[in-house]
Amino acid sequence: MTLIIIIALGILAIGSWVFVYFKIELFKKDIVKKEEELNNRLYELAIVKELGDRVGYSLDVHQIIDIITGSLHQFIEYSAVSYMLVEPEKLIFKVHLEESVHRGFVDEVKKRMIGSISALLNKDFQKVPIEEILSGAILIEEVQEPVKSFFNIPLVIGDKIVGVLTVAHTQTGLYKEEEMTILYKITNQASQAVTKLQKVVETEQSKLNSMMESMADGVVMTDLDYRLMVINPAAKKAIGFESDQEVTIFDFIDNLGGKFDIRGRLEESVKLKKTYESEKVLLNDKFFQIFVFPVINKATEGQETVLGGVVIFHDITSEVATEQIQKDFTSMLVHELRSPLDSIKRIATVLKGGTIKAKTEKYEDYLSMIHSNSSGMLNLVNDILDVSKLEAGKFSVTKKPGDIKDVISKRIDFYAIPAKDKKITLESTLSEDVPSEVEFDAEGIEHVLNNLISNAMKFTKPDGKVALNAFLHKKGGKINDEMKIAGLEPLDINIKNDMDAVMVIVSDTGIGIKEEEVGSLFKKFKQLESGKTTQQKGTGLGLVITKGVVEEHGGEIGVVSEYGKGSNFFFTLPIKPVTAPTPATAQTPTDTPPAPDSVVVQTPTPTKPVADPAPPIPAATPKTTPPVA
Amino acid sequence: MKKILIVDDKKEFRSTLSDALNSGKYEVEVAENGIRALEKMVSFEPDLVILDMLMPEMGGLEFLRELKGRGIKSNILISTQLAQMDDISNALGEGMSVGVRGYIIKSSQSLEMIVKEIEKTLSSL
């Protein structure tokens, strides 16, 4: 019984011991395995890191394999490590010797490797030229040891066999399963890393490509033989090709002709590592500045290799145009300034000649010419000063309470005679709802009115019409409705309606303004093409200042124009109640405009001011001044 | 007496030049654009035309084309600004056959120089 118990205990003890032993062994194995895996993993990581650091994005297979073979020695023993790579037209055979061997050894390795490659790729490589590179220990013919251990594995990058990696030793029976496994793992890992890297490079390249595709500048990259490596659509366009056409360097040479020596500049750039910047070059109606750079690879520190050249076609058409506009503007200003001076000088010459007697009509005529020429010049000089003040943000207006209707009427009267001379009908309609007392800068608003009326007259042919309309634009009011009430055709003017304002519209039956030119109308340096053709002179500064004056009053300015039919220039003058509420402002709370729809129905959009406006609209009877001329 | 027609949209230029020329030596008439000038070509029959290039209604170039079209020949001096030198080559191309003889540059020549140029041209006719 005791024995049985002892035996049982013994069995149990042995059993537990065996169990524990095996468990420990298992653990041990597991630990060893894990350690191995960790080691391999570390090595793989080291390789990947080294690949990343040293190879960068160049993806040179030689370099990659050099890295692998360079660090292989810590894992496997060999007399020689070598690789053979398949290149177009040749094989690269590189051997690194860890110890001295004789030539026969290397030749044997080479022979076996060619055999393996031929078998792997199912192609005969016996007669393909071989480029051999030997490194490491020197060859010594006295060392007669033959190849006794040999192992090679295919080098696969991105599912493609690119060559063979081989380890060889003078000792026998070295490469067993363990070594082979390590070697497989390493090359496999390296291959995966490279494949991944290749994908990264491809993504980067496609990013780069899509960036290049969408770039406004033309980009051309060539290799050292001036073959096009990269070309984007903008570059093709620059030489007049469509983006889907195939283009060679010769197309560039031909199409750039005598304008730009692309070949010469590339050669200079690549050979002398020089950057070149061209003057403006005209290609197919566009101006380009062309840059040429060498492409330098600085993969390894201190070493620079020129890979090719880059040509960039930078479109400077708009810069050239701006430059031209500024030049035109300056010469126009000079002309506008010297032309009256020339006139005055000529008049002085004639008067000095003594043929014109004082107090005669002719004499007086000349005096008034001197007067008008000098005041024209003075005005221009003032305009230039005003514009420079506007540009410097130093332009200001002095607002005082005054009668805006009176100012407008006086301006219309002022232009009555010139209008009559030019056979233009000039009329004005001041709606009664325009308050008589408003705060404004009388001189500034006179300038605005002068500018708009004289412009309208300048671009209107004889028998045409210039009309000025002024009415009250109510806070929250719809401009089209208000125009109808004032007896005008709606113009879809887009303006603020956050406060009451006097709206002034100067309409003409002139040449109108092209839609694309409206935007630049109130800018300095602008010269409308349509204005040029009719030979209407002017500095274009007037509208710039006009805009400045209106905006200083808190108003808005703009134009609604139809090319060939005429223009409607408008501006608003916001009303702040002066001291006592004017009749117009007093009406505001009760006389809200009727619903827009009813206005549309009831007002048959009259073209002439109506004496009897639609019944529900109060206080909007336009007071019409008789047309002059 | 030689007859001179001054075509220019600028009143100051027309007046001063005609006064500078009109000391009993020449008969001078003026026109402010090409249309008026065409009328004067028929009614006045000038020996010499001083022709501005940039004018409203009808400019100098158009006037020359009209002359060509109507088969009217005369002697013409183009007058222009320094900044518009292109006008001269255009006018020469257009106007050789109708009698363009030369040019004056208003912005760089004084009234006396312009008068001298006109007298020189007239004496060579």
Image: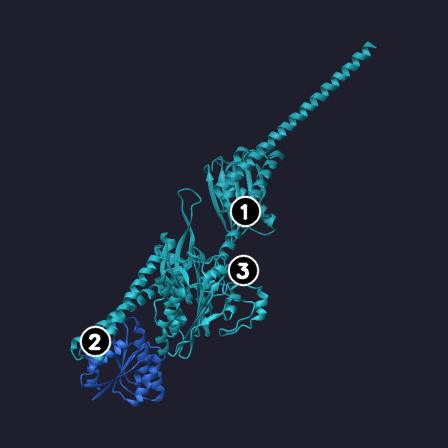
Q: Quadrant of the N terminus of chain A?
A: top right
Q: CA distance from mark 2 to mark 3?
A: 70 Å
State the residue position of label 1: A200
State the residue position of label 3: A590
Amino acid type of the residue tagged 2 in the rendering:
Leu
| Image point (41%, 67%), residue name | A285
State the residue position of label 2: B111
| Image point (26%, 87%), residue name | B46
Q: Is residue A544 above or below residue B18?
A: above
Q: Is residue A4 above or below residue A332?
A: above
For the residues bearing labels 2 and 3, Cβ distance under 8 angstroms? no
Q: Is residue A436 above or below residue A165?
A: below
Q: Quadrant of the C terminus of chain A?
A: bottom left
Camera-side mark, 2 or 3:
3
Amino acid type of the residue tagged 3 in the rendering:
Thr
Mark 3 belongs to chain: A
Residue A384 location in percent, x, y?
A: 31, 62
Q: Colour of chain A?
A: cyan
